[in-house]
Each structure stands twice: as C-alpha cells, then as structure tokens.
Image (cartoon, rainbow, N blue to C red):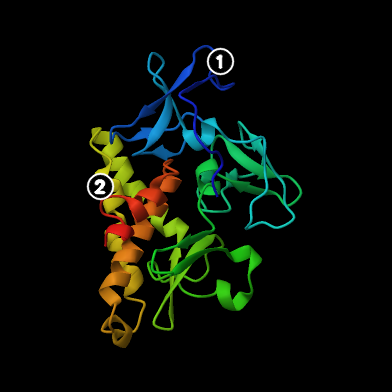
Amino acid sequence: MRLFEEPPARLTHSSHPQHELTLSSTAGAPFRCDGCQEPGSDGPRYRCAPCNFDLHTDCALAPPTLHHPLFSRCTFKFHHEPPPHAGGRQCDACGDRVSGFVFHCAERDLDIHPCCASLDDRIVTPDGRAFELINTKEVTSSSSSRRCGSCGDKTRRFWFYRGRFDGEDVYIHVACVKERARREWEASYRWRSGAGQIVLAGAPLMESALTSLSKRTRRGGGFERFRKIVGLVVSAIIAVIFGNPMGLIAAVAGPDGLLRG
C-alpha cells in the first residue's frame, strides 16, 4: 500500500531538525536509512549531504497512524524508536530486527518496517494474473502451511506472495526475497558499488520458486511468459522493501516491464 502520493522536493524532519532534507536520486548507490536503519538502493531518498544523512521516502513521509489491510482491526502508530521489548523487536512482515523507525500496534504487539508497510497487498499483471500478499497470522492453517518455493520452509510466520499458474500455486516469502537481496546489498555497500546486483538477486530466487511447480506444468504453454512475470514481481518486491515504492510501476510499465513484454 502506498504511504504517500507525490513526495515534495524538500522537507524538514524531526529526526534531523537542523537541516532541510532534499529529495535526491541514489544514482544506483546503496545506502543505509538513518531512520529505520534498513538497506536502501535504487530510487529516491531524502538526503542532507553535509551531514551524510539519508531517509527512505517511506520513512520521511510516514503517517502518524496506519491501518494496514493485512491486519484487520489494528491501528499502528509511527515511532522513531521501537518500544522496549525483551530480546528486541521483529518486523511482522519480513522477520528482520526492528532497529529504528517502525509502525507499532500496541493492542496486538505488532511491528512493521515503513518500507514493508508499503508493499502492495495485490499485484495484478497486464494479463490479469494476480499475486496476493498474505499474512500467515491472518489465514487458515492449510494456507499458511504451504512451502515457500524458494526456501522450502513452511514454518515462517511472516508475509508471502501467492501466484498461480496452470492450476498450481507459487509461494514466495517476503523474508526469503529480502534475505537474499540483503546479502547482495551488503557486498555493494561494503565496496560502494552499484545497486544493480541487488535487484539481480531476485533471479536465482525466482528460479528456485518456479522449481516448486511440477515438470508437467513447467513444460506447459505460456510458462516462459509466466517465468518473466514472476521474475519481475520478485524484483518489484526487492525495490519496495529497499525503499523504492515506485519499483512496482517500473516492473510493470518500465522499459523491461510486463507491458513491454
């Protein structure tokens, strides 16, 4: 879900009140958000160059309260720091540790990174295929126990996308996507190289996800088209959770997107 519409060119933020922040392009350079402390890559960010201070757009423009469609009857409040909790807090979307900005629901003791909160709950491709974002805490045991096509695990308690091809389901954990992309981000951040390899991390994850389909299905007509769709959806997930909420639009309508295929 989109947390904002059009981002302003400049703003002031309570986390960095001494200077104005400017909406800037990352130019492909990886960075760490000084708000949520999570990775950032391609896409815009808010930056104070003299202080080397950066915020994801989702972090800079986070609303004070949030009602997320995957958590019914739950009101999240935005916090600059996670509320105290023995052993630390964990994002209920991706499973990673919460170290900075967070949406917190006190009633149900839930936490979501701002970028994870920006994930679309439903991705519909131009040919009408839908990938649904599902919260394992809100579904029946039969749905939540399906194995992820990437890691083969069926015990993770976090969000996953579910697509369908030729009568078979494809499951992809948001946690698996982020874990693999983070490894590429850490290498890029260490060497200050371009962020292109981060999105490319989705390729092997996509391939392993599709191997969960039967051989008969993978030999069926239209499978190569579906293979491309899954790859671009995975790339869009990576873009959004790393701070580029426009990543989904690029995956669908960009020069290599689904509308061009």
Q: On screen, 240 above or below 137?
A: above
Q: Earlier in the sequence, mark 2 or mark 1?
A: 1
Say few, some or many: other residues with alpha carbon within 10 Å of mark 2 (under 14 / 14 to 19 / 20 or more). Answer: some
Measure how far apart labels 2 and 1 are at the Cα level.
34 Å
Q: Position of residue 28 (x, y in %)?
A: 28, 36
Q: Is residue 52 above or below residue 242?
A: above
Tell me the residue at 32%/43% (across/down).
185
At x 43%, y 47%, the residue is 240
Q: Secondary structure at mark 1?
A: loop
Counting from the top left corner in percent of width and height, residue 97 is at 52, 45
Above-or-below relation of 66 to 230: above
Asked if the residue at tag 1 contacts the one at tag 2, i.e. Cβ–Cβ closer than 8 Å, the answer is no
Position of residue 189 measured from the top left corner of the image (x, y, whole percent): 30, 36
* Residue indicated by mark 2: 197
Above-or-below relation of 224 to 76: below
Judging depth in this view, the residue of 258 and 53 nearest the camera is 258
Residue 36 seen anywhere in this rendered image of the structure: no
Name the residue type under label 1.
Pro
Name, please, the residue furthest toward the bottom. Answer: 216
Q: Secondary structure at mark 2?
A: helix
Q: Which quadrant is the C terminus positioned in?
A: bottom left
Q: Pointer 1: residues within 10 angstroms few (<14), some, or many (20+)?
A: few
- The residue positioned 67% from the left and 35% from the top of the image is 64
Question: How many numbered tags mark residues here?
Answer: 2
Please state which amino acid type lies under the numbered disc 2. Gln
Q: Residue at x 25, y 32 (%)?
A: 192
Q: Which mark is residue 17?
A: 1
Residue 165: percent from the left, percent from the top? 39, 78
